[in-house]
């Protein structure tokens, strides 16, 4: 049974439209479009943020889209790809449904260039992600931002293959 | 007066260095020698006291200092034709035969109460006369520093330039695995000896900056999982959290009068340059635009601040009045110029210049704008001038390890400083008088 629910969640794409007044109270104020592609049961949700849709259990499910928590960037860029925009929508949906859940967005860069400039670049990336999530209805108080610049690489080495892994923003769920 | 200062410093050093083993943390290797280095003979000093050797090999320290400057080449011990320790013993024709321009001799004598009398003399071999000579009495813990002071005196006499051997460098090391790194901020003598741990952390440490009097270090610490700037008193280890605003707190830089710090804060939305008064913590914002503004450094006259900004599309260096005002771009070569340090005379800027996939240290003359690339690594960063302006120390990567390197400002002399284990980065050379 757990399997079914997770497949349901995995298959269901809930698009939350952030309307003009969405920041304050989500109940009933925001139109929700339910796009369930490939759902095994033609997934249907009831209510704007049905409590069963994004249970905290799904944060620990390796098959859930929420399992992917890293956004990658091109060199010297803070632009978010469209597939990453989709990923951010997933995470935003969860956070909107769980307004006491907080995250930290950690910004990182590859090792090239001067360190404090890289702190600023990492911050720019994390803020870009924060903006997308807030546009998707996540409350500002749910998000904190920190930039580590090049100081905490995910991988060591001096090739583009390594650098690409370090130009990232990590979504860290607090208390998980 | 020198002796009094050395005595005071000696006490402090004894307290700090008491537990430190006397070996080099950083080993120094000269990678590109200089033509026209002055040939000099530094004869081992005579020793009168308990035991067969003196507690410090002062002549070896002096020879190493002089060699490390790139301006001198000392005769190897095995090539010394004689071992005079008194002026009367010197036969100049012996030294002319081995083609040295100058000769240094001396003697150390142990006195009561763990004091040592050190005397040295510097000779011009061709003219056959003494150029200078001094006598000092210092405690045991001050002998290394005295040796560096002697190097300074010899260097100044023979080059006309102030020596920078009696100085220190602050730097950061990392060790451990990617997921479990230890970050350490240290201060060592500029020859790599006497490393002292200032702070160790499991979270990043960055951007050390010496106060103008050399008594404090400002630095960035992520120990609370977010960037904060601390100011730590070196003699006591006590520290104060200076700023901890929301967002970035970074790139601390001391004003020449030691009364303010310039720094980077993003509390107002994106990284901007601010100055903070150390007495009353009042903040003044200097820049105001949506771009990244960071890495401030003061000109020695205290009137301007040079900083990195990408307001033009990519990182370049700009100059702004220290009290705020219009920022003017000062770098025009290439599309990446960042991480500036300014020479003590205010005439040159060292920076990280990116071009063709490599990041190198370049020096720009502020008056003419002429720029020259001094290094040839691929990941060179963090340039810092010596307090006499003759050398630049920086961080680079050799064989996948972070090491430090130094290059003379004219680019002709190069050396590498490596840690025995771990990675070194972010070197900052102390002011004079440390």
Image (cartoon, rainbow, N blue to C red):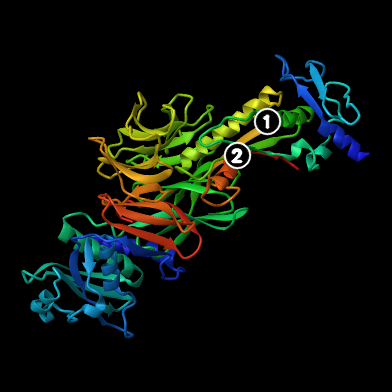
Would residue B222 be seen by someone viewing this image from the given angle? no
Q: Are marks 1 and 2 on the same chain?
A: yes
Compared with B392, B316 (above or below) is: above
* Chain identity of mark 2: A
For this view, does A77 lie left or right of residue B28? right
Give whichever of A165, A173 is nearer the camera. A165
Give whichever of B338, A100 is nearer the camera. B338
The residue that appears at 34% across and 55% down in the rendered structure is: B406
* Chain identity of mark 1: A
Q: Position of residue B313 (x, y in %)?
A: 44, 28
Q: Position of residue A123 (x, y in %)?
A: 55, 35
The residue that appears at 58% across and 36% down in the rendered structure is: A73
For residue A26, which quarter of the picture? top right
Give whichever of B130, B39 is nearer the camera. B39
Would residue B343 be seen by someone viewing this image from the given angle? yes
Q: How many marks?
A: 2
Say what secondary structure mark 1 lies in: helix
As drawn, the residue found furthest toward the right would be A1
If you read the primary sequence from the N terminus, does the residue marked by circle 1 or circle 2 appear first? 1
For this view, does B373 lie left or right of residue B217? left
Give whichever of B361, B393 is nearer the camera. B361
Q: Cα distance, mark 1 to mark 2?
A: 14 Å
Compared with B78, B215 (above or below) is: above
Task: Tell me the tag on residue A83.
Answer: 1
Residue hosting label 2: A168
For this view, does B278 lie left or right of residue A10? left
For residue B137, which quarter of the picture? bottom left
As drawn, the residue found furthest toward the left would be B127
């Amino acid at each position: 049974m757990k399997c079914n629910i997770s497949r349901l969640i995995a298959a269901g794409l809930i698009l939350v439209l952030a309307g003009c007044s969405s920041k304050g109270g989500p109940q009933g104020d925001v139109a929700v479009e339910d796009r369930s592609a490939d759902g095994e049961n033609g997934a249907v949700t009831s209510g704007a943020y049905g409590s069963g849709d994004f249970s905290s259990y799904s944060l620990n499910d390796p098959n859930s889209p929420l399992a992917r928590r890293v956004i990658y960037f091109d060199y010297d860029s803070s632009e978010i790809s469209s597939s990453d925009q989709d990923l951010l929508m997933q995470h935003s949906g969860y956070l909107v449904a769980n307004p006491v859940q907080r995250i930290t967005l950690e910004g990182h860069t590859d090792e090239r260039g001067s360190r404090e400039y890289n702190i600023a670049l990492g911050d720019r990336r994390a803020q870009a992600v924060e903006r997308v999530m807030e546009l998707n209805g996540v409350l500002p108080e749910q998000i904190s931002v920190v930039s580590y610049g090049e100081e905490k690489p995910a991988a060591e080495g001096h090739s583009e293959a390594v650098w690409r892994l370090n130009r990232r923003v990590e979504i860290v769920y607090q208390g998980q | 007066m020198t002796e009094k200062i050395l005595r005071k410093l000696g006490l402090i050093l004894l307290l700090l260095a008491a537990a430190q083993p006397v070996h080099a943390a950083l080993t120094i290797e000269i990678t590109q020698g200089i033509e026209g280095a002055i040939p000099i003979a530094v004869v081992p000093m005579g020793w009168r006291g308990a035991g067969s050797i003196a507690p410090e090999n002062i002549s070896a320290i002096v020879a190493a200092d002089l060699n490390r400057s790139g301006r001198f080449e000392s005769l190897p011990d095995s090539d010394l034709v004689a071992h005079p320790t008194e002026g009367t013993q010197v036969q100049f024709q012996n030294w002319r035969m081995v083609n040295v321009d100058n000769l240094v001799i001396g003697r150390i004598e142990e006195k009561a109460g763990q004091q040592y009398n050190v005397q040295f003399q510097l000779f011009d071999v061709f003219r056959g006369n003494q150029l200078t000579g001094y006598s000092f009495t210092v405690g045991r813990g001050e002998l290394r520093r005295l040796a560096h002071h002697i190097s300074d005196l010899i260097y100044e006499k023979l080059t006309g330039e102030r020596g920078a051997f009696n100085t220190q460098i602050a730097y950061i090391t990392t060790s451990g695995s990617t997921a479990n790194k230890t970050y350490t901020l240290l201060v060592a003598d500029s020859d790599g000896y006497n490393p002292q741990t200032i702070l160790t952390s499991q979270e990043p440490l960055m951007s050390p900056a010496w106060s103008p009097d050399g008594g404090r270090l400002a630095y960035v610490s992520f120990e609370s999982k977010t960037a904060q700037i601390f100011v730590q008193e070196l003699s006591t280890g006590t520290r104060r959290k200076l700023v901890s605003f929301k967002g970035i707190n970074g790139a601390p830089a001391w004003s020449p009068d030691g009364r303010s710090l310039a720094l980077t804060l993003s509390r107002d939305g994106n990284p901007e340059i601010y100055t903070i008064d150390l007495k009353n913590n009042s903040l003044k914002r200097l820049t105001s635009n949506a771009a990244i503004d960071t890495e401030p450094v003061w000109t020695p006259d205290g009137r301007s601040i040079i900083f990195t900004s990408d307001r033009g599309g990519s990182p370049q260096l700009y100059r702004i009045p220290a009290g705020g005002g219009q920022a003017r771009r000062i770098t025009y070569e290439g599309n990446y110029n960042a991480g500036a340090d300014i020479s003590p005379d205010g005439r040159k800027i060292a920076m990280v210049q990116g071009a063709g996939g490599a990041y190198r240290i370049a020096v720009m003359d502020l008056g003419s704008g002429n720029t020259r690339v001094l290094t040839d690594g691929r990941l060179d960063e963090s340039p810092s001038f010596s307090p006499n302006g003759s050398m630049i120390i920086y961080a680079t990567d050799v064989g996948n390890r972070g090491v430090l390197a130094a290059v003379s400002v004219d680019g002709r002399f190069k050396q590498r400083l490596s840690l025995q284990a771990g990675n070194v980065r972010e070197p900052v050379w102390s002011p004079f008088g440390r």
